[in-house]
Amino acid sequence: MGERIKKLKKIRIHREGTHELTWSALAIIGIAYLLWYSFSTTIPFWIFIIIFGAAWFMALNFYRCPIRYYNGDTDKLVVAPADGKIVVVEEAEENEYFHDKRLMISIFMSPLNVHANWFPIDGKVKFVHHQDGNYHKAWLPKASEENEHADIMITTPDGEDVLVRQIAGALARRIVTYAKEGEECYIDEHLGFIKLGSRVDVFLPLTAKACVTMGQPTTGDQTVIAKMA
């Protein structure tokens, strides 16, 4: 797609978590200070530090955001939009927009995975649509259509439409989408963020060739999941 534009935000902690991590850290420090000076024994202090310190570091791990670049030519490549595990690779009916069969590739993200999402392909954002819905477990087939989700349609330089769907799971209750209608988008750019366990579906033309298999782990912005015809 010609010269690719790099607009990476060079951050190691995702911006979606900086506010929560900062204020929770201050709260933990404040309560720990009170416990240290309010009791004759340090046992309450250490119990609090162990429990809430561990919880804070788990949140820190959840909000980590690796700085990644795809090394190589991205022409006609579709890369993984998220870290996780492949749970669907099949031809499926997509009746909301395409009304025909598409190659569907789905990635499930556990709470331990990075939850930043990347654009899977170079192109232009055709539209962004948010749909309210249920909160089934994200790996279930019905989650793709029935759960709360955000749809991002991307038109490739060859005129093919590719649908990326961010799906909320049983725990995930917030989907953040940075994609804007009419903007050009590129591999290496952040598409959005989903909090806690969730899933991302990619709907491709049937002429695309899948490069992943069921159960295969993926690395966002690195693993090639398909090649366009």
Image (spheres, grey):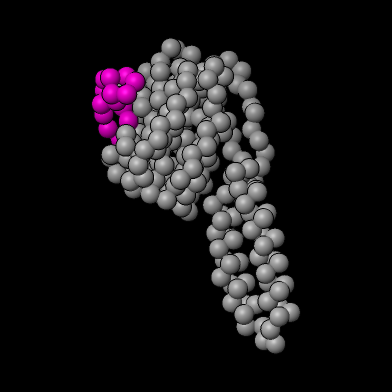
Q: Position of residue 108 (x, y in %)?
A: 39, 44
Q: Residue at x 40, y 25 (%)?
A: 163
Secondary structure mostly seen in the magenta stretch: strand
In the rendered view of the protein, which quadrant contains the C terminus? top left
Q: Note whether residue 225 is visible.
A: no
Residue at the top extreme, as displayed: 159
8, above or below 84, in the image: above
Quarter of the image with the N terminus is top right
Q: Nearer the viewer, residue 200 or 41?
A: 41
Q: Nearer the viewer, residue 18 or 12?
A: 18
**12 left or right of 58 in image:** right
Residue interval drawn in magenta: 89-104
In the rendered view, does 188 fall on the left or right side of 165?
right
- Residue 145, given in percent of the width and then of the height, sits at 32, 34
Is 101 contained in the magenta span? yes
The residue at 60%/73% (across/down) is 48
1 to the left or right of 40 = left
Residue plotted at (56% across, 31% down) = 178
Residue 85, position as x, y percentages in the image? 39, 45
